[in-house]
Amino acid sequence: MDAKLEALAAAHGVATWYENFQRRRTEVAPESVIGVLGLLGVDAGTPAAIEAALAEARGRDDEGRLPGTIVLRAGQRRELPAPTELTLEDGSRRTVEILEDLPLGWHRLGESTTLVVVPERLPKPPETWGWMLQLYSLHSAGSWGMGDLGDLRSFVEQSGDAGLVLLNPLHAVTPVSPVPASPYSPSSRRFANPLYLRIADTAEYGRADDSVRAAIDALKPESGELIDYTAVWDAKLAALELLWPLAEPVDLEADPGLADFARFCALAEEHGPNWQRWPAELRHPHSPAVRAYRSERIAFHAWVQQLVERQLDAAREAAAGMPVGIVHDLAVGIDPTGADGWLLQDVLAPGVRAGAPPDAFNQLGQDWGLAAWRPDTLIETGYAAYRDMLRRIFRHADGLRVDHVAGLWRLWWVPPGMGPAEGTYVHYDPEAMLGILALEAERAGAVVIGEDLGTVLPEMTETLERMNMLGSSVLWFTRDWDTGEFRPAADYRRNALASISTHDLPTAAGFLAGEQVEVRAELDQLAGTVEQEWATWKADKAALLELLRQEGLLPADSAEQPAEVVLAMHEFLARTPCRLVTASLYDVLLERRQPNLPGTFDEYPNWRIPLRASLPEVVTDPIFRRVAEILGKRNTETVKRRVKGTPR
C-alpha cells in the first residue's frame, strides 16, 4: 500500500492491516481503506487528494490546540499548554495550568473542550448467580402473544434466591407495522420497546370503565407457535389509543430528548419507518419543517414511553433485594433508518455498515447493516450522544451487558458497494469509551459485563479485568483450541460471567442432539461438508462428556440422558471461580432450538421462538428448581468462604 495512504489512514484511525481469527496478519485492500476514509469525510481517491488530506491532518496536529474532549482517569495529571479556565460540573470555576486531583464527572475547559474525569475501576461485582432471559419468549395468561414487563416482574418475584436477571435488549423499535423481530437492530438504544408494555398494568386501564376494558381485553392476540410481533403491536397500539383519552397531560418540555424521539415516531406514522425516504425537508431533526411540525401523536408516543419506563421501574423494584438485579443488554449498533439514525446523524458515519471480518464460522465476513459512531465527531462533541444513551439505559438497569464489547476499541466498517470481507477496522479511543461507561455505571451503582467472545485482542480482556468489568466465559468456547479439550472448571476466569451458551449458539439439549448441525445442513449454512460437521460435533460432544466425568459430575456408565447432562453442566458452572454464573431458560427447559441462528434471516425463525412452557410452568419445572438449587448453593459456599476470611 502507498506509504502516504497508510499515513493518512493512521491519522484517522483506519486500519491498513489486522490480525485475523487465526492471529495471522491480513492486509486490507487500498480500495477498502479509501472507501472507509470517505465515510469519515476524507477524500483519498487520488494521489493529490491524499497529499492534501495528509497535509491538513498534520497541520491540525501542529496547531497545538486542545482536543474536543480530554479524558482523565482518577489520579492522573496532565499539563496544559497555557492557563485555562476550568468549569467543574457543579458550576464552580478556576484557572488551571495542571489538571490533577479533580472530582469525577463532566467538566469544561475553556469554551470548547469537554473534560471527563472517570474512575480508574469499578467496585468489584458481587459473587452470585442468575437467569439469562429472552423476555419475549416468556408467556402467561396475562401477556399478549409474547413476554412482557409484567411477566418480568412475576419472574423476578418467583426466581428463588437468584442474584440477577440478564435480559435481551429492550431497545425501541420504530412503532410502525411491520415490526422487526431482532432486538439487536433497534431503532433507538436510548428508549424502550413498547411491545413489552403490559396494558392491564397501566394506571389508565385501571381507571377505564368496564366497556373500555372489555374492548381492550377483546384485542388480545392469539398465541401461536411463533411470535408475531406485528400482530402484538397492532393489538397493543389499538388498546393504547382507547386508553389515550384517560392519560394525564404530557409535558413535552420536561424531557426534550424524549420529545424528539416521540416526534420521530409521529413522523414515521405519516411518512414510513425509513427517514431516508421522507420528504427532503424532514430528513434532519433540526430543520425548520421538523421544528414547525405539530401533532397530537407526539404527546401520544411520549406517553407510551412513560408507561414503559414505569413498568421497567416496577420490575427493577421487584429485584431490589438481589445482589445485582436487572441487567440490560446494549446492542452494538442501530438500524440506520430508525430514530437514532435520524436524531444522531451528525455523530454517525453516513453509509457505513458495521459488521465483522471473516472467521471460522462466517468465512465471508458479516454485514450487520448497523450504523456506527464517527470517532472524530464523538471527540468534537464531548461524547454527549454516547453519554446520553448510557444515562437513559442506566435509569432502569442495575447492570449492563455490552454486546461485542470489542467495538469500544475498534469496529469493522464495510463501505458502500463492498462485501463484508472488504471492510476494515476503525479505531475508537478506549480510554474514553470505557472510561465514560465506567463513570455512568458507577453513578448508577451498576455492574458492567463485556461480551468478549470471538476475535478479541489480549489488551481488551486485560483492560476489562483491570477496570472490574466482567468478561464472558461460555462453556462451548472455553477450551484449548489446539487440542479441542474443554478447560476444567478451576481454569475459568475470576472476573467473568459464566454460561453454557448464548442466544447465538446451540442450547444445551440442542448441542447434545446435534440440532445445530441438522438445522444448518437443511439451510445450507455449513462451512464444511455435512460429514465433517457431524464428525466435529461427535468429537465435541465426547470431549464435553469426558470433561463432566473427569469433574465427577457424570457417572462413567451414564446413559447420557439430556436432563442428567444438563444438570451436570450447571454443576460444572457452579464450580467455576467466575463472579457471576447464569442459567438460560432454554437450557433448563431442554429446548432444542436456539433463539438466533447467525447468517439466516427468513430461513430460520430468529427471535420468534417462545418457550414451550408458560411462566407458571417454568418456575415449577423440576429442572428449573434443581438448577436454582445447584447455583443457589454456590452463594452459600461464597458466604462460608468470606466468613473464613478467604480473599474475594
Image (cartoon, grey):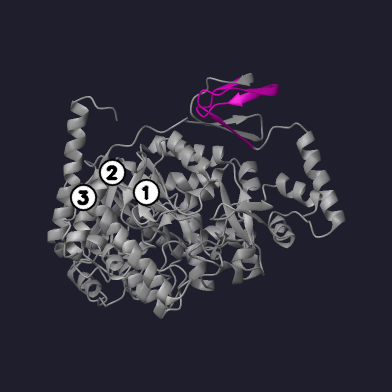
Q: Main secondary structure of the magenta part?
A: strand
Query: Three-letter amino acid code at disc 3?
Result: Glu
Q: Position of residue 280 (x, y in %)?
A: 65, 68
Question: Which of the image's four quarters has the N terminus?
Answer: bottom right
Residue depicted at x 63% and y 42%: 379
Query: Three-letter amino acid code at disc 1?
Result: Ser
> Nearest the camera: 276 or 3?
3
> Nearest the camera: 210 or 144?
144
> Nearest the camera: 21 or 622?
21
Q: Tell me where the magenta segment starts and ends, as one range.
A: 69-94
**Circle 2 crowding by C-alpha within 10 Å: few under 14, some 14–19, many from 20:** many
Judged from this view, the residue extending furthest toward the right is: 48
Mark with earlier residue (1, 3) = 1
Local secondary structure at mark 3: helix
The residues tagged by marks 2 and 3 sit, at their Cα atoms, a distance apart of 9 Å
**Residue carrying label 1:** 473
On the question of residue 633 being in view, the answer is: yes
Q: Is residue 421 above or below residue 394?
A: below
Do the residues under discs 2 and 1 have CB atoms within 8 angstroms?
Answer: yes
Do the residues under discs 2 and 3 have CB atoms within 8 angstroms?
Answer: no
Mark with earlier residue (2, 3) = 3
Is residue 225 shown in magenta? no
The residues tagged by marks 1 and 3 sit, at their Cα atoms, a distance apart of 15 Å
Q: Is residue 377 above or below residue 181?
A: above
Residue depicted at x 17% and y 65%: 561
**Residue carrying label 2:** 576
**Residue carrying label 3:** 571
Q: Position of residue 128 (x, y in %)?
A: 25, 41
Question: Which of the image's four quarters has the C terminus?
Answer: top left
